[in-house]
Image (spheres, rainbow, N blue to C red):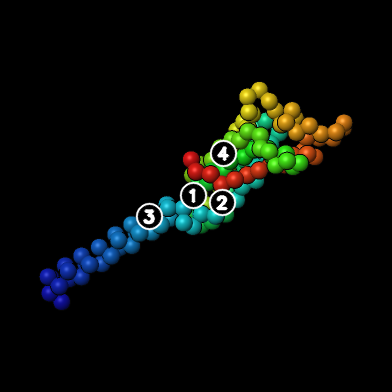
Amino acid sequence: MNTKYQSVVLTIILLWMVASWSAEFAYNNAGIGANIHQSCSVRGTGDAVCTFTNMGWSPGSQCVRVGVQRTSDGQRFGSALACSGNLATNDSRVVEASVLDGATGPMDFCVAGLGQPWTSVCTVFVDPATR
């Protein structure tokens, strides 16, 4: 092989490697392979607690809107934005946010019978959200 031909072949191989690496980097960091699971609850104090876990094979993030909904009439009380931040594969993160609407707490909005918890008349809603 002559030197000019070797140089062209090596240049093509190098360009292919750079393009391949760039495409893989962009794909992995676009959240395409991320599979983020979340579990959220709301305390009687009005604090929402969400645990996010990335079960996918590339980094990613997720945001949700969390609040309380009365089961009798469907009325919603407050909401909070909870975002995982960037999670690597198999990473978990706990995020806390307040859903308080003014000075009212879920126990004031979700009035249950004597001896019953507020969760007997209200449920926690979790909706997908963007930052």
Mark 4 vs mark 2, foreground winner is 4
Q: Amino acid at mark 3?
A: Ala
Q: Secondary structure at mark 1?
A: loop
What residue did someone put label 2 on?
36
Labelled pair 1, 2 in contact (Cβ < 8 Å): yes
Q: Amino acid at mark 1?
A: Gly
What residue did someone put label 4 on?
82
Q: Position of residue 1 (x, y in %)?
A: 15, 77
- The crowding category of the residue bearing disc 2, from other C-alpha atoms within 10 Å (few below 14, some 14 to 19, many at least 20), is many
Q: Amino acid at mark 4?
A: Ala
Residue 90 shows up from this direction:
no
What residue did someone put label 1 on?
60
Labelled pair 3, 1 in contact (Cβ < 8 Å): no
Report the Cα–Cα distance between label 3 and label 4: 26 Å
Q: In percent of the image, x 42 and y 52: which residue is there?
A: 29
Mark 3 vs mark 4, foreground winner is 4
Q: Amino acid at mark 2?
A: Ile
Q: In percent of the image, x 87 and y 31: which residue is there?
A: 114
- The crowding category of the residue bearing disc 3, from other C-alpha atoms within 10 Å (few below 14, some 14 to 19, many at least 20), is few
Say which label, 2 or 3, has the lower sequence index.
3
Say which label, 3 or 1, has the lower sequence index.
3
What residue did someone put label 3 on?
26
- Residue ranking furthest to the front: 73
